[in-house]
Amino acid sequence: MRVFGRVTCRSPNMKTNRSQAGHRVLFGLRTRILTWYVVLMAVSAIVSIVVFRHVLFDRVERRIEKSLVQEVEEFRKLTKGRNPETGQLFEDDVTSIFEIFLNRNVPDDDEFLITLLNGQLYRSSPRALPDSLSRDSKLVNYWATLTKPEGNEVVTPDGIILYLAEPVIKGKTRGVFVVAQSTAGELHEVDEAVIAVIEVTVVVLAVTLVLAWVAAGRVLAPLRLLKETARSISESDLTRRIPVQGSDEIAELTITFNEMLNRLQTAFAGQRDFINDAGHELRTPITIIRGHLELLGDDPEEQRETVELVTDELDRMSRFVNDLLLLAKAEQPNFLILETVDIGLLTEELYTKITALANRNWRMENKGSGLIVVDRQRITQAMMNLAQNATQHTTDGDAIAIGSVVTRHCAHLWVRDTGVGIDLAEQERIFERFARGSDSRRRSEGAGLGLAIVQTIAAAHGGQVKIFSRPGGGSTFTIILPLDPPAGAKTL
C-alpha cells in the first residue's frame, strides 16, 4: 500500500506578498519616520551628553581654582598678620607661619597643603601624598625653586593637578606654600554622573521609541485608509469617501482625495451617460437603415425612396459624429483661431445666414459697434445653433430676433424667440449633452448637442451663455464674450 503525504497548495503570490510586507516594514513610511526620529534623538542625546560632560568639567575646574585662590588668600593674610599664639609679628619665623596655617586649615578631598622650607619638603596636610607630590618628585623640587607666585595645571601619572604656589621669603629663610588639588576624583564623579545620564537616556529613548511607533501608526492611519479606499475604488463604485479627522496636513490630503473622488465620480458618470446616449443616438439610424435595406425589393420607386431615407439617416449620423468631434476638439489648444472682427459686420452676416433657416419673422434688434477678438467661424456656428434651436420651438410667422452690443468689458450676441419658453427647472439641464426639452409637441430632431456646442464655444472664448425664458413667453439666449482674447489661443 502506498501512502501519499499531504500536499499543500500555495498561491505563487504568497511568497511575493510576504516579501512585499517585509519590505514595507523595513522601508515603509512609518519605519522611515521612526528611523529619522531615532537618528535625531540619538544625535541630540550624544551632543547633549558631550556638552553636559564638558560643562561639568569646566565647573569642576572653576570650583577648584576658586578653592585654591581662597587658600592662598588666607595664607597671605596670615603672613601679614601677627602670631595668634604670641601676639607678635612673625618676622623671619616662616616655620611658625606654616605650622599655624596647617594646624588651622583642613584641606578638602583631593586637596593638598604643602610647605617647602629652604628647598626641602617641610610638612604637608594631609601627610600622605601621591607619588607625583612625594618628597623627591620633580614637581616638588620645581616648587622649591620658585621665587614668585605661580599657578598652573600639570598632567601627572596620578591625574591632572591644579596648583597655586606662594613663595615666602623672610630674611635668609626661604619658604614656599603650595595648595594643590588632584582632579582625578572630581573627574571620576563627573564620569559617573555622565554614565548615569547615558543609562537614563537609553531607557527614555527605548520607551520613546515604542511610544513613537504607536503614535506614528495613529498619525499614518488616515494614509492607510486612503490606500485601502484607493484599492477598493473601481469604475463601477466611486461612492466611498474617507472621513476627515482634524485639520492638519493629512486632513487636507484627505479632503483633496475626497474632492478628487467627487470629480472622478462626476467624470465617470458623465462618460457613462455620454456612451449610453451616443450609443442610443447611433443605434436608431443604424436600425432604420438595416431594416429598410433588409426589406429592399426590386421596385425602382421603392429603391429610390429607400436610398433617400438611408442617405438622410447617414447625413444625420454624420452631423452627430461631427458634433461629437467638435466637442472633443474643444479641449485642444488649437480649437480657436482668433481674429479681430467688427461686431456690426458680423451681426449683419449672421442675420443674412439665419434668415434662410426657416420661414419666420426675422428681425434685427440691435447692431453693436466696435471691434472684438473672436473666432469668427466658431461664433457663427454658435449663433446658427441658437437660431436653429429657435426655429424648432416656433412656428411659421413667429418672430425671432438677433442682436449684438459691446459694453465696456464684454460683447453680447443674442437670439430671442417668441416660442413656448422653457421651464426654470430645465434651464440649466438643456446645456448638457443629449439634453432636450420636455415639450413633447415640439421635440428637437437633433441629438441634443446644439446647446452643448454653444456653451463649449463660449467657454473656449472665456465667456458664457445666459438664458432668460418663461413658459409661454419665449426665450432669449445671450452669448457673453470678454473683449480680451483667452490665453493660449491662436491669433491670426
Image (cartoon, helix red, strand yellow):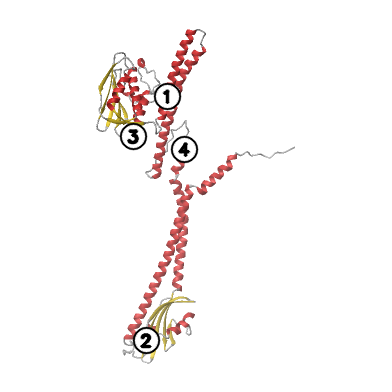
Residue 486 marker: 3
Q: Position of residue 489 (x, y in %)?
A: 36, 34
Q: Earlier in the sequence, mark 2 or mark 4?
A: 2
Tell me the CA gap for discs 2 and 4: 90 Å
Q: Which residue is mark 2?
A: 168
Tell me the CA gap for discs 4 and 3: 37 Å
Residue at x-position 61% and y-position 39%: 10
Q: Earlier in the sequence, mark 1 or mark 2?
A: 2
- Where disc 3 sits, the SS reads loop
Please tell me in which quadrant of the rendered image residue 73 appears.
bottom left
Q: Which residue is mark 4?
A: 230
Name which residue type carries label 4: Ala
Instruction: Give the left or right position of residue 289, taking residue 2 as reference.
Output: left
Instruction: Point out the residue furthest to the front here.
Output: 492
Q: Which residue is mark 1?
A: 322
Q: Earlier in the sequence, mark 2 or mark 3?
A: 2
Instruction: Point out the residue furthest to the bottom here.
Output: 172
Residue at x-position 42% and y-position 64%: 51
256, 295: nearer the viewer? 295
Q: Position of residue 359 (x, y in %)?
A: 32, 14
The crowding category of the residue bearing disc 1, from other C-alpha atoms within 10 Å (few below 14, some 14 to 19, many at least 20), is: few
The reply to whether residue 268 is visible in this rendering is: yes
Closer mark to the observer between disc 2 and disc 3: 3
